[in-house]
Image (cartoon, rainbow, N blue to C red):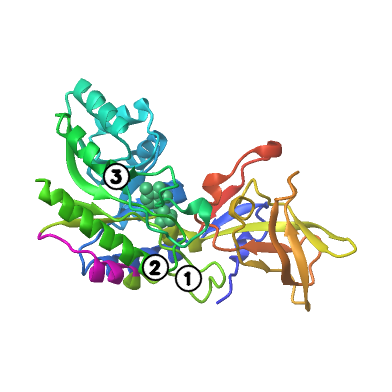
Amino acid sequence: MPFQLPQELASTPTPFYFYDLALLDRTLAALAAAARPGGYQVHYALKANSNLPILERIRAAGLGADCVSGGEVQRALDAGFAPGHVVFAGVGKSDASVNLALAADIFCFNAESVQELEVLGELAGAQGRRARVALRINPNVDALTHPHITTGLEANKFGISLQDLPAVIDKLATLPHVELVGLHAHIGSQITELPVFGELSRRLNELQTWLEDRGHRLPHLNVGGGLGINYQQPDTEPIPDFAAYFGTFDRHLVRRPGQQVHVELGRAVVAQCGTLLSRVLYVKESQQTRFAILDAGMTELIRPALYGSHHHIQNLSSQLPAQPYDVVGPICESSDTFGRAVLLPETRRGDLVAIRSAGAYGEVMSSAYNLRDKAEAVYR
Ligand SMILES: *Cc1c(COP(=O)(O)O)cnc(C)c1O
């Protein structure tokens, strides 16, 4: 069914974010059902959307939290996630954020360099604790997604490169306050080619054998996140195919008896439940182009400007014959464009427009550029 705004929200000031919590709940139920047979532990990546009403539902569904800053660790704790279900990744963790996470006794740090391991050991020692770490390796696997959201190639800043692994293992032997509990990889986002996860699994299998040959048994493997969603047709696929996703790991990842496998999903959990609503301020025609100028812009949803990403756009007010529009925002940047030559029913000032699949990496990336007010979030 195409998107419909609940009647009582028709006069909400635009732009605003609408979150369909019933769809979020159905998504979480589908995720739990798909993860259960293989015993996968799912951590939700807070950076996709960290609004408390959303986090509370995700926590209630039994997911853990995957954080990439001290602010996110604190937010996860505030939302009631148990510290034992919080992991902390990130290529540049500040000392203050590491200390916060150590004091909270989170489950695990995903460590990305030799120097980070040294600092973790030092700060943990100063607190009289041991830091549990998983080594975030850079497996040099191409995620076949947009270059800006590819993270597992040699050229990316993330993770420990394979040739550095021997030095990292030597270093660990000198750090009494650091305990190796697993391997971690996260190769990118909006991944729709599932065989990519098979390739990641094979790489992890090799590394696990290599580590075991050197006396390291790993209780945990963390395969990261990145499962993509259908931005083109959100109504035909409102819930991602989680069964196919876990099935890929079932077939390719070799698990040791009792070993736990963690996944960290962000986008796939929350993207489809969020919609950005906006009104048309003006329709302007030039020689070649007809512009629909919205009251929402890149300050509310930056993905199209940042990665040229596609969002499905609907005019909820008009039933007239369709015409092509360049749908743009009011911000003083030419990249402030939601879509070019978008077919919309004839559009007029005041029409309500829905920009779909905006629940992930939407509101969290909003800014006050041009001194804009923060768009409100409403939940139903
Ligand atoms: C961003 C991120 C995720 C989540 O990625 P999605 O594509 O939203 O699933 C998982 N793990 C790490 C380390 C991340 O940085």
Find residue 219 and report its horizontal and vertical position in percent: 15, 51
Between residue 136 and residue 322, name the one nearer to us.
136
Q: Which residue is mark 2?
A: 26
Q: Under tag 3, what secondary structure?
A: helix
Amino acid at circle 1: Pro
Whether residue 249 appears in magenta in the rendering, the answer is yes
Between 194 and 87, the one nearer to me in the picture: 194
CA–CA distance between discs 1 and 2? 10 Å
Q: Residue furthest front?
A: 163
Residue 92: quadrant of the picture: top left
Q: Earlier in the sequence, mark 1 or mark 3?
A: 3
**In the image, 78: left or right of 232?**
left
Q: Is residue 195 magenta?
A: no
Looking at the image, residue 9 sits to the left or right of residue 132; the answer is right
Up the image or down, 132 lies above or below 6; here it is above
Which residue shows up at 64% across the image and 45% down it? 299
Residue 163 marker = 3
